[in-house]
Amino acid sequence: MEWSFESPKGAVTVRQEGRCAVCQAISRAGERALYKAWLSGEKGKVLLGTLIPEGGALRLRRSVEVAWLERQGAWPPKTAEILEAYSLPPQTPPQGWTRQEEPWRLLDGELRECGRELRWAFLRQDMDGFFLALPWEKQKPFPLPSLFCLASLEKIEEKWYILFRFSRQGKPELLHNFSHR
């Protein structure tokens, strides 16, 4: 018996071969992220694994005992999907920008503590201060939520970023007074 499931991120097929279920997943190449395949039954959901690059696509092939899937409530399969587990940062910064590790160190006062979870950002400095650009990721927490009203969603070199403006002292400023280009 064989099942096929399509999702926005790719396809999963499940084929029963004796006591085992052979599960295969394939996702479109070119997306800079880690993807995981999941199999769901009427009473449960199991992680099949992480897709890896192979032959110009991201793929997963795994053989699992049907009895184990039954115990997890995932057999027979009702749905399967490929979900993004982690977005990878761009390899190179946009032209005119540099990669800044621990950008929270540039911020003033309480913002420094709020920004401690920022591991990196792209930085562009000018005479009066600097911009921080953070890749925008759907379904991810908004970085620096206390500055939500001062942020701007901007497209830089075909990628979307959340942009913030700061004075040389690390104090937030209104973006509309400055150009990041």
Image (cartoon, helix red, strand yellow):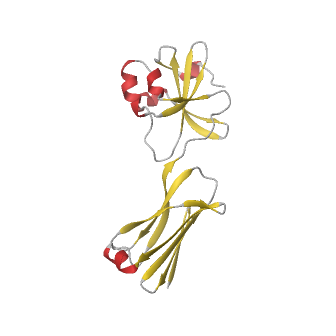
Quadrant hosting residue 176: top right
Residue closer to the observer: 31 or 79: 31
Residue at x-position 39% and y-position 67%: 46
Residue 4 at x, y percent in the picture:
53, 75
Count of picture labels: 0
Q: Is residue 111 above or below residue 17?
A: above
Q: Is residue 106 above or below residue 120?
A: above
Residue 169 at x, y percent in the picture:
47, 14
Left-right relation of 43 to 118 = left
Residue at x-position 51% and y-position 57%: 35
Quadrant hosting residue 54: bottom right
Left-right relation of 125 to 86 = right
Residue 132 at x, y percent in the picture:
54, 27
Residue at x-position 56% and y-position 20%: 130
Q: Is residue 61 above or below residue 172?
A: below
Left-right relation of 42 to 134 = left
Residue 9 at x, y percent in the picture:
56, 60
Residue at x-position 62% and y-position 34%: 93
Quadrant position of the C terminus in the picture: top right
Residue closer to the observer: 122 or 43: 122
